[in-house]
Structure formats: structure tokens, C-alpha cells
Image (spheres, grey):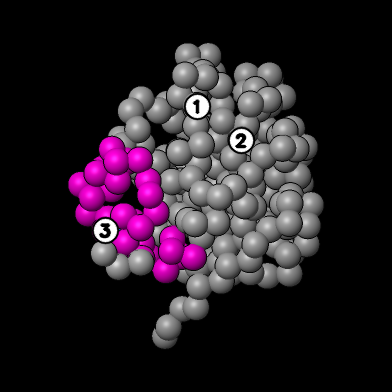
Amino acid sequence: MSDTSFAALQLPAPFLANLTQLGYHDMTPVQAATLPLALGGRDLIAQAKTGSGKTAAFGIGMLLRLNQALFAVQGMVLCPTRELADQVANELRRLARGIGNVKIVTLTGGMPMRPQIASLEFGAHIVVGTPGRIQDHIGKRTLDLARLRTLVLDEADRMTDMGFYDEIAAIVRECPSHRQTLLFSATYPDDIREATGRFLNNPEEVAVETRH
Ligand code: ADP
Ligand code: MG
């Protein structure tokens, strides 16, 4: 067993078995650099290129922190676009097979509100969405974040490029202050660095070098 094997993480056996079934044996570099910290509850800023496995890097800790018996939103992932939110939700659903019945709902713009509201009323553990639509749900009080434990800002550089900074700041104000916050980005420009002071609590910074 290599020390970048998922088996080195002491994950619950059914969770590890599911990873193996997915063909995940070794952690990717960003996963190896972040998962021990994320599982320990640290706030993180992680920079790694596209396709490096960032979804599992934030998703595994988020899934393992869930209390499945509590029908409340405990994890939230903010993404820049609907397509990316759908991809993240699908990857989280694959990972969640290792822990049973986790309800993951996507909340993205350009889609009708009513089915999203119905899914939230039915009880969601995790929501994945775009900042504008998440804000709409907060405004309508159809999304209650009082029990949120893990907040993920995925593709944070793209979200700030797209002008979502104010929406993100408003959403973060609705989150409990006692939470874990994980910021993932393909690049690490200065405006991200500024954001991190406001949104994260003493974050560990992880950058995975890309070889060209
Ligand atoms: P990123 O968000 O960094 O662009 P993704 O999380 O979308 O990357 O992952 C990219 C691809 O790699 C996905 O198809 C995912 O299923 C796969 N993947 C992630 N982690 C592993 C791993 N440890 N072993 C094998 N495949 C992996
Ligand atoms: Mg990604």
C-alpha cells in the first residue's frame, strides 16, 4: 500500500470499497495534499489545474461529516456555471454510494424554481449550485443554512471573474460562522487571496505544481 493510496486514510470500509469500485486506488496529488487536512476539519485554499480530481478532494470530507439522520442542508458547493454544478453533483453522488442515502440537490439558474423548492422541502443533505440561484432560495427562505457544516467555493477564480464576488459574500453571511470552508481554484489571483481573509478561518494553503 503506497502512502498516496486511499487505504492510507482510514476511511470507513464501505466508503473505501466504493472508491475501489469506482477505480480510485491512489489519490491524485491535490487529493493527497488536501484530504488529510480536510478530514481533520481545517479550512483550505487549494490550487490545482482542471482535471486533477478536486471534486473528491473536497467531497470526501464533506460527505463523511454528514449526519444522514438529520434532514437538513449540511454541505453546500458554489460553482460558476450550471454545467459545472451538474458535474460536481454527479461526482458527489458517485462518491456518496459508499455511505448510503445522501440527498444531493442542484440549485442552478435557468432552471424552474418549483422543482428545486420541492426537492428542498423533501430534505436535502447537500446543495450544489450557482451563486445567483442560491441567493434566490435564501431570499425566498426555501434554503435554510442553519445546519451547514461544510462550505465549498469551487472554481473560485472563475466565480470572481464572472462577477459573483458580492453574491458569494452575501451567501457566506447566511452561513453559520462555525463551519469548515474549502476554496478550490485552478489559479490563485490576488482577488482570491483577498476573499480568503473574509471567508476562511486560518486556512492552510495548498498549491499543486503542474508540470508542462
Ligand atoms: P477537477 O475538478 O480538478 O477538474 P474532477 O474532480 O472533475 O477534477 O475529476 C476529474 C476526473 O478524474 C473525474 O472523471 C474523476 O472521476 C476522476 N478522478 C478523480 N479522482 C480520481 C482518483 N483518485 N483516481 C482515479 N480517477 C479519479
Ligand atoms: Mg472541478
Q: What residue span does the magenta drawing correspond to?
A: 4-33
Q: Which mark is residue 25?
A: 3
Q: Which mark is residue 199?
A: none
Identify the image quadrant of residue 72: top right
**In the foreground, 125 or 160:** 125
x, y percentage for residue 81? 52, 47
Q: Cβ(mark 1) to ligand 1 < 8 Å? A: no
User: Secondary structure under badge 2?
Assistant: loop
Q: Cβ(mark 2) to ligand 1 < 8 Å? A: no
Residue found at the far bottom of this picture: 212
Q: Residue under label 1, please give it.
A: 67
**In the foreground, 104 or 163:** 104
User: Secondary structure under badge 3?
Assistant: loop
Q: How many marks?
A: 3
Q: Residue under label 2, please give it.
A: 149
Q: Cβ(mark 3) to ligand 1 < 8 Å? A: yes
Q: Do the CB atoms of the residues marked 3 and 1 lie less than 8 Å apart?
A: no
Query: Amino acid under label 2?
Result: Arg
Give the position of the N terminus as an image quadrant: bottom left
x, y percentage for residue 211? 43, 83
x, y percentage for residue 171? 71, 37
Cα distance, mark 2 to mark 1? 10 Å
| Magenta stretch: includes residue 15 | yes
